[in-house]
Image (tube, helix red, strand yellow):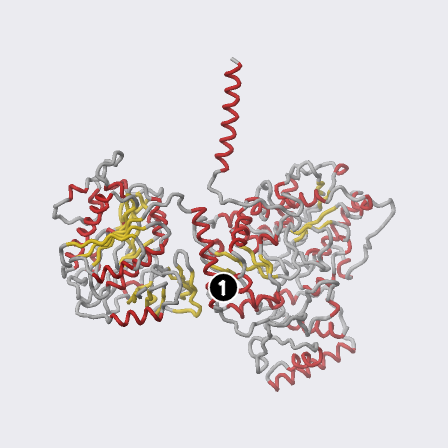
Amino acid sequence: MKLSAWQQSYLNRRSNSFRGQLDTSGESAGMSPLTTFWFLLHSAFCLISVVLGFRFSRLVFLFFFSAASTNFSAFRGGEISAPLVMHSSLATNPIKTIASPANQTGGSRVLVGRHGIRVRPWPHPNPEEVMKAHRIIERVQREQRALFGVKKAKTIVAVTPTHVRTFQKLHLSGVMHSLMLVPYDVIWIVVEAGRVTNETASIIAKSGLRTIHVGFNHRMPISWDDRHKLEAQMRLRALRIVRKERLDGIVMFADDSNMHSMELFDEIQSVKWIGAVSVGILVHSGGTEESSSFQGEEETPPFPVQGPACNATNNLVGWHTFNSLRYAGKSAVYIDDPAPVLPRKLEWAGFVFNSRLLWRDLDDRPQWIKDLEVLDGVDEDIESPLSLLRDTSVVEPLGSCGRHVLLWWLRVEARTDSKFPARLLELMSRLFKHCTMDPLVLWRVVHKDGVWLGIETYNTSYLLKPEMDTGFWVMVWSRSSFGLGKLDGMEGGVVVYFMVALGD
Amino acid sequence: MDFWKVGLLCLLWAASVLAIGAVELGRHQPTERISGSAGDVLEDDPVGRLKVFVYELPSKYNKKILQKDPRCLTHMFAAEIFMHRFLLSSPVRTLNPEEADWFYTPVYTTCDLTPNGLPLPFKSPRMMRSAIQLISSNWPYWNRTEGADHFFVTPHDFGACFHYQEEKAIERGILPLLQRATLVQTFGQRNHVCLKEGSITIPPYAPPQKMHAHLIPEKTPRSIFVYFRGLFYDVGNDPEGGYYARGARAAVWENFKDNPLFDISTEHPTTYYEDMQRAVFCLCPLGWAPWSPRLVEAVIFGCIPVIIADDIVLPFADAIPWEEIGVFVDEKDVPQLDTILTSIPPEVILRKQRLLANPSMKQAMLFPQPAQPGDAFHQVLNGLARKLPHDRRVFLKPGEKVLNWTAGPVGDLKPW
């Protein structure tokens, strides 16, 4: 049939792959008059196409051989001037033009040959579908948690030292939203430097969690060193509350400017007495482009990580601590210094323990924990919870023996003389009220060969569709906070430049 | 004394029952039993239900070909080689052909590879024909039934049509000499020339150790909605699109390339297997042929397969209820794929995941070395056993001839 002969020669010409060239079996040799005629017609079409600039033959085909139905297809590459889009509302049989009847097998509705590429009129995501999909994902994850997660979930007791300042609402809301999303019970102990204030109380009241809000009778000092010491004292105050109230659960330290992964809360459920996690330290450079020091290092993580160090058999052998020598002389001493703020050797945030360790008379309390009363009234600097232990080898390393970084430490504060207009926050909260993605309080940036492809947290994936590069600003939002961060050359982190916490 | 004996027996019985209970309370996800159309047939044991005789062909049909190109052991057509090895050492093998129910001819027709690793099917018809001539002249069993109790493994793109281009394959049709034999192939499409009635569809070969090496903890939350990695346009063979995959893959790309729910691209990430385990749905669209190893990967990793291939016949379709496990989308409905997937009720999705988690389901898709109970080898044997006993008409009267030995393209008749 002449149609199939045309199609055959056409296809043979088109398939220019290695396989096609070897296709010699079954090919008849010699040119019949019919073949010569088609060859000439074909070359005529080619010449016309060269002149016109598009595939003339295709138009002829469409014109002569297409059915009466109004089916069109979208051609890639703009070969025909106006792209023709197929309407998705057709009920009749599909296509079309080049399928030769000889190929149609009895009863089958599948035709061999060229088919159109169906594109619907508005090929973009529908927000309702996206929401439905998120609900499905949520349901699937809930089922996974029920099947593979912890069977007897313990309460999380979160300890947060805070004080009133410009960025307090930002940071505290971030922590608050992470805690609100934790699928377990949470008791939130907020210790405020100075005295209990209405501002702090109004922020934490919106959490819906059980909160214990106490004041601490010292004002926040102006040097970072003293601040670290005071924060340690405030945490001890919270631990005394745990002891007094005999709160049962797992104590973790959620500093208000830290960022926590949802995976952290799942991981700490497995702690028996005291555990340690790896903390990534994001040292903010304070305005000058200090990130050049990170670009050369590709093998080691380009940011410091504090946490347990394990040997090959996953036993704790030591600690990765923060090395402040690199920043000697360049770190901030006072709170408004435009220099990086450094953490201490081991931050409190990297430790979690069973609250029963603090209870007053517990029969099976291990021998290696000092009683909290020993520290009452003592003025020395408690650098990390390790000082509470007589024997530090009992610490359980969590997060695949410290290989997963589950939370991020960062100290970013506005200048003390700055004022953040309260109205602005209300305005933004109204703008972003309907953004309903899961909080991206910790994000791992997925990239390949330096090209950013997406952002994902432990239980959400959000893809950045156009490829973005280092230096791009990323806007991320959660149920009620909105953040602006910059993609930095760090696998596994985004440096947050500022984050606006919304009301609600 | 008697009382103590009875008491001890009771104690032993109780201990055994409790022990069994303790084993079952492992950390497995609750799974659902897969009831195929013929009952719970995935766990049937074929040993004792059939006997297979393996012809001893000269090594030029099998071993020498493999020696020339050991890549045949790892590509997706490796099932023909592993089936041979399995049968040689299987309890269903018999050395006495008089008592055999089925006869197997080990000829590796899909092992002539290009430098890129793609098999060339041009010599396969001649190789097969030469093998059949050999067995029909050296043993009487072929002529007894003209091959109706013989089976062959033809895992290439369009099975025994021996071509990779669909039109050519349809033109050639199934090799005339195989008209009465049972074909074990990966290709399956209803009402297609290249799918013979009574064929057994098998999954393509996927390396089990490689997949099991990439398992991640089951508690990792599934956060990707739809996942796909592969080509959308085959620019080498079909530059404008519309031919490759009947335009279905291109339609997926054009409609969903900027949709955040669809993690689709042509990249080759090193975390491909891990990402599948973090996805809820995995697309398995047709390519040049309707079947794809993605189906096997999706089943192993617990990702619900979304099959976009009209009229496809999936592996072991008489034993596995694929409609309950996967989602079937017509090629014409691809632009509405997001609506289709998001409108599936969550209970149905959870049920599909439970069915996928069933270990016998995962085992049935694999070709492990050495063979394990319930794996794809055993499912093939189960399928062959289900076809027994042979119909009386299978056995021909002496001198009766059904097959036409000179049919087919002239090129096929040349000796190999």
Q: Chain of mark 1?
A: B
Residue at left 42%, top 67%?
A: A464
The residue closer to the viewer here, B65 or A337, is: A337
Whether residue B380 is situated above or below residue B334 in the rendered picture: above
Q: Residue at x 68, y 36 (%)?
A: B48
Q: Is A420 left or right of B314, judged from the image as shown?
A: left
Tell me, yes or no, if residue B182 can be seen here.
yes
| Element type at mark 1 | strand
Decide: is A353 above or below B330.
Answer: above
* Relative to A312, B316 lies left or right: right
Residue type at mark 1?
Answer: Phe
Q: Is residue A310 above or below residue A166?
A: above
Q: Residue at x 31, y 63 (%)?
A: A296
Which residue is disc 1 drawn over? B262
Reply above or below: A10 against B310.
below
Numbered circles on residues, count:
1
Crowding at mark 1 (Cα within 10 Å: few <14, some 14-19, many 20+): many
- Residue at 70% x, 76% y is A67
